[in-house]
């Protein structure tokens, strides 16, 4: 595996983790809201 492939795998892992953190942040931000 070349260096570019290693960077590509690392970048995709970071992207997935960022998506998870965005989802958690949205859930925390909406924790105090109520449905009407």
Image (tube, rainbow, N blue to C red):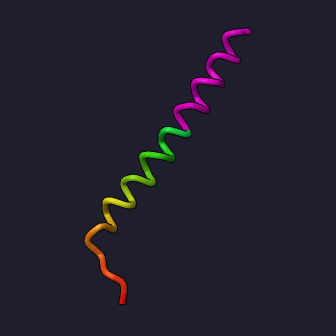
Instruction: Work out which residue is located at the far left of the displayed protein and give it.
Output: 32
Image spot of residue 5 (x, y percent): 70, 18
Q: Is residue 10 above or below residue 34?
A: above
Image quarter of residue 1: top right
Q: Nearer the viewer, residue 24 or 1?
A: 24
In the image, the segment drawn in magenta is 1-15
Image spot of residue 2 (x, y percent): 72, 9
Image side of residue 6 versus residue 14, left or right: right
* Residue at x 51%, y 47% (from the top left corner): 19
* Residue at x 31%, y 59% (from the top left corner): 28
Image spot of residue 20 (x, y percent): 47, 46
Image side of residue 16 versus residue 34, left or right: right
Instruction: Verify whether residue 32 appears in magenta.
Output: no
Image spot of residue 32 (x, y percent): 25, 71
* Residue at x 69%, y 16% (from the top left corner): 4
Q: Is residue 18 above or below residue 8?
A: below
Q: Is residue 28 above or below residue 2?
A: below
Instruction: Verify whether residue 6 appears in magenta.
Output: yes
């Amino acid at each position: 595996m070349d260096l570019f492939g290693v960077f590509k795998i690392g970048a995709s892992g970071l992207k997935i983790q960022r998506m998870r953190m965005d989802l958690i942040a949205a859930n925390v931000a909406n924790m105090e809201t109520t449905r009407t």
